[in-house]
């Protein structure tokens, strides 16, 4: 009975105990609510799902764009393509372009011209003999010009001396020791 | 404490219904109003179960996030305030169970200092702050069982299920909490009497 009285006394005092809440607590509630909403999917709001999809799509685009770019770079040899634009006869070009477009309607125009040039290159029977000659001669010219452009690396004077040293020593009748890692270990 | 008249509580429900509807639609203004109306009451509950004010404030934040996110599950069955209280108590219990390892050591330490003395303080009056001060000094295990049994009105079986303890443990902790609390209250009463004299 005494226990009940004490408990009743405590309950009556404490059940409606309402102290003042510090102001910063509500700011914390708002932050937690923002995070909670951000982590949950909602079509009307920006949330982590949209960001994840955007990042995924962007990654996929970057990866997909990277691959065709490298293959087309292999096919696109600048002199050949520029030459092909000049060489392809107006009578055959529209027909070939049309067939390429029919096969791959989404492919860009550049790709179709590149394919035309490949046809020109690999099938000399269908192409004009003069064209074939011109292409090959152009390629040779380009390679020659590339070689000419490459700067000659001059051997440093010290290295020259080192390479000539054994010959000179032999002439004088001296033994020449050459450095090797194995001898160094010994 | 005087019970709230029925008409008044109905009026209260009429006032609160637009706020509940607004919260269900996720309106910020309605959420603000709900916080203003109930934050103090729920903070009081959190304080009773938490070790300190910081912990109580963290639990209160969790309580409001749960309320805002789960208000759709309130179907106007029973009192809204009761529903809010239940969320606050459940969140506090979850928090208590999370920190159970640290609590055990404190209980053992406090057991040494517990003495059973017959005390009669039922005729004395205490403010809520004084009571809170004494409850706050209880070891966390005693405090939790005491709050659940005395203020929330749970039975020992329910408490043992909620806290994952034995029924007899719940009973003994309540008994010790009572003794502890009575002694603390008696000290406060003695100081008050001395101040008056």
Image (cartoon, rainbow, N blue to C red):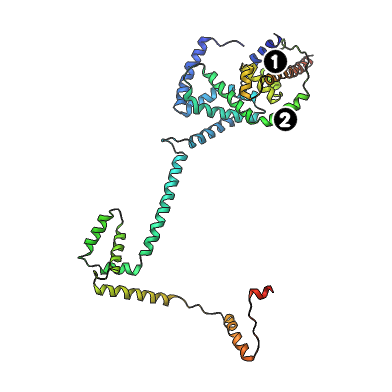
Q: For the point 40% across and 51% down, which residue is it?
A: A61
Q: Which residue does the numbered mark 2 point to in the structure image?
A: B105
In the image as oriented, which residue stretches furthest toward the bottom?
A172
- Quarter residue A5 falls in: top right
In the displayed structure image, the side of residue B48 where residue A53 appears, left or right: left
Q: Answer whether labels 1 and 2 touch (C-beta < 8 Å).
A: no
> In the rendered structure, the residue with mark 2 lies on which chain?
B
Judged left or right of residue A84, residue B153 is: right
The residue pinned by badge 1 equals: B126
- Few, some or many residues within 10 Å of mark 2 (<14, 14–19, 20+): few
Q: Position of residue A7 (x, y in %)?
A: 67, 13
* Residue drawn at 59 percent across, 32 percent down: A24
**B9 vs B169, nearest the viewer:** B169
- Residue occupying image coordinates x 52% and y 24%: B34
Q: Earlier in the sequence, mark 1 or mark 2?
A: 2
Return the x and y of residue A144 as percentages of the image width and height. Answer: 39, 77
Question: Which image quarter is the N terminus of chain A in?
Answer: top right
Considering the image in quadrants, where does the C terminus of chain A appear?
bottom right
Q: Residue at x 52, y 79 (%)?
A: A154
Tell me the SS state at disc 2. helix
Asked if residue B39 shows in the view, the reply is no
């Amino acid at each position: 009975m005494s226990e009940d009285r004490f408990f009743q006394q405590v309950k009556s005092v404490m059940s409606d105990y309402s102290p003042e809440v510090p102001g910063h607590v509500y700011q914390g509630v708002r932050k937690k609510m923002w995070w909670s909403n951000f982590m949950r999917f909602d079509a009307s709001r920006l949330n982590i799902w949209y960001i994840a999809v955007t990042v995924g799509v962007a990654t996929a685009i970057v990866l997909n764009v990277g691959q065709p770019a490298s293959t087309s770079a292999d096919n696109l040899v600048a002199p050949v393509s520029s030459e092909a634009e000049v060489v392809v006869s107006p009578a055959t070009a529209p027909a070939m372009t049309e067939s390429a477009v029919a096969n791959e309607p989404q492919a860009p125009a550049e790709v179709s011209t590149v394919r035309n040039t490949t046809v020109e290159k690999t099938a000399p029977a269908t192409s004009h003999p003069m064209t074939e000659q011109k292409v090959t001669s152009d390629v040779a010219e380009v390679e020659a010009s590339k070689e000419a452009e490459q700067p000659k690396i001059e051997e440093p004077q010290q290295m020259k001396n080192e390479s000539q040293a054994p010959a000179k020593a032999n002439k004088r009748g001296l033994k020449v020791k050459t450095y090797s890692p194995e001898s160094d270990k010994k | 404490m005087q019970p709230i008249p029925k008409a008044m509580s109905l009026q209260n429900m009429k006032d609160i219904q637009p706020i509940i509807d607004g919260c269900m639609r996720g309106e910020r203004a309605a959420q603000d109003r709900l916080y203003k109306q109930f934050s103090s009451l729920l903070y009081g509950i959190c304080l009773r179960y938490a070790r300190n004010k910081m912990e109580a404030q963290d639990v209160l934040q969790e309580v409001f996030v749960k309320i805002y996110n789960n208000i759709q599950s309130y179907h106007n069955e029973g009192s809204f305030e009761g529903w809010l209280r239940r969320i606050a108590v459940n969140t506090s219990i979850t928090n208590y169970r999370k920190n159970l390892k640290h609590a055990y050591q404190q209980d053992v330490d406090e057991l040494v200092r517990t003495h059973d003395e017959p005390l009669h303080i039922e005729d004395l009056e205490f403010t809520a702050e004084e009571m809170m001060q004494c409850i706050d000094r209880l070891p966390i295990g005693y405090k939790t069982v005491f709050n659940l049994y005395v203020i929330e009105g749970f039975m020992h079986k329910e408490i043992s299920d909620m806290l994952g303890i034995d029924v007899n443990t719940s009973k003994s902790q309540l008994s010790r909490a009572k003794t502890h609390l009575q002694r603390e209250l008696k000290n406060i009463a003695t100081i008050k009497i001395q101040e008056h004299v």
